[in-house]
């Protein structure tokens, strides 16, 4: 555990630092790869911690909750491409995320934005390969780098990002041979999501790992399920519907509330109350 000051200049500890992740480029390849996932709530954060997941990436609204539960995990904050309009808003949002405990900031915006963030000292996290937000431009969701020309395009994009100071990229759905060939030709830390073993860090989403329902009818190829939490969600839903239906039916039949759920007056108090009720007269007419 490393002693640091975070980006709001508060004393803190981190399991990994920016320097540690950069050093992965020259590390012993026999060491186990680091893991990354995206816990979205308290239960998922706790599960990731207990499972030993190394690095997190989360939405901006979750960073304060995460830091209250996982104060020491290296964590990036991401923001959707269309959430912010101007460069000024992006800069403000990024600084706010860093003040609240983020260790890097994800953006899909222009090279100019990436460079501005980097020049201000913010570790910038971006994206290569399949970018679902931009899938219109590549004919839909598909694998990337399956031709030599497209593989070179990926490499050139990566080097351009390197030129503007990008620290890390999510490498999504790239042919494994491509990431294997380019990973050590860049200083950028690579998070492999469906791009093979060559990435510096292996990433997958909590929902995919746990076998929860996907945004798509057919989960993407890289969404390998190591569990079946979706089955439990279905079971919980069925149990919930059954319980609510029984409640409605018992009320409709005049059976509920049950005697054991009701409260009774003390012995003799009912008679006293009814007598007082009969004698009561309004004070004001």
Image (cartoon, rainbow, N blue to C red):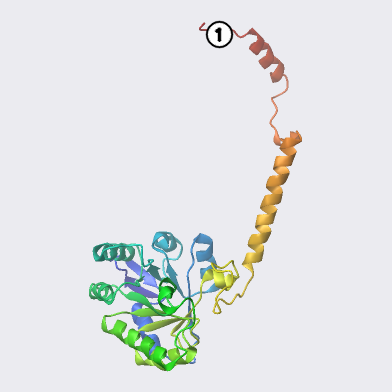
Residue at 61% from the left image edge and 9% from the top image edge:
280
| Residue highlighted by disc 1 | 282
Horizontal and vertical percent position of residue 33: 48, 84
Badge 1 local density, few (<14 within 10 Å), some, or many (20+)?
A: few
Horizontal and vertical percent position of residue 29: 46, 92
**113 with respect to 215 (left or right):** left
**172 with respect to 230 (left or right):** left
Q: In this view, does 52 lie above or below 95?
A: below
Horizontal and vertical percent position of residue 254: 75, 33
The N terminus, quarter of image? bottom left
Q: Is residue 50 visible to us here?
A: no
Q: Nearer the viewer, residue 36 or 222?
A: 222
Residue at 51% from the left image edge and 75% from the top image edge:
204
Q: Residue furthest top?
A: 285
Q: In this view, does 136 lie above or below 178?
A: above
Element on which disc 1 rests:
loop
Q: Nearer the viewer, residue 64 or 118?
A: 118
**198 with respect to 87 (left or right):** right
Residue at 62% from the left image edge and 66% from the top image edge:
229
- The quarter of the picture where residue 163 lies is bottom left
**240 with respect to 131 (left or right):** right
């Amino acid at each position: 555990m490393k002693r640091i000051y975070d980006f709001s200049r508060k004393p803190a500890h981190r399991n990994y630092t920016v320097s540690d992740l950069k050093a992965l480029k020259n590390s012993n390849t026999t060491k186990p790869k680091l893991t990354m996932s995206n816990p979205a709530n308290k239960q998922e954060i706790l599960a990731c911690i207990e499972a030993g997941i190394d690095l997190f990436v989360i939405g901006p609204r979750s960073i304060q909750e995460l830091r209250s539960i996982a104060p020491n995990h290296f964590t990036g904050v991401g923001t959707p491409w269309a959430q912010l309009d101007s460069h000024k808003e992006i800069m403000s949002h990024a600084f706010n995320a860093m003040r609240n405990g983020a260790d890097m900031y994800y953006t899909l915006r222009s090279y100019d934005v990436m460079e501005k963030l980097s020049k201000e000292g913010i570790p910038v996290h971006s994206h290569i390969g399949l970018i679902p937000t931009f899938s219109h431009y590549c004919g839909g969701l598909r694998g990337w780098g399956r031709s030599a020309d497209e593989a070179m395009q990926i490499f050139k994009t990566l080097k351009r990002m390197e030129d503007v100071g990008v620290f890390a990229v999510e490498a999504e759905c790239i042919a494994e041979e491509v990431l294997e060939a380019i990973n050590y030709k860049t200083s950028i830390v690579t998070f492999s999501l469906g791009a093979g073993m060559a990435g510096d860090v292996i990433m997958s989403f909590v929902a995919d790992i746990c076998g929860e329902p996907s945004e798509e009818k057919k989960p993407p190829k890289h969404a390998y399920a190591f569990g079946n939490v979706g089955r439990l969600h279905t079971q919980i839903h069925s149990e919930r519907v059954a319980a609510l239906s029984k409640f409605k039916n018992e009320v409709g039949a005049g059976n509920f509330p049950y005697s054991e759920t009701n409260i009774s007056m003390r012995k003799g108090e009912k008679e006293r109350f009814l007598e007082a009720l009969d004698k009561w007269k309004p004070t004001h007419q």
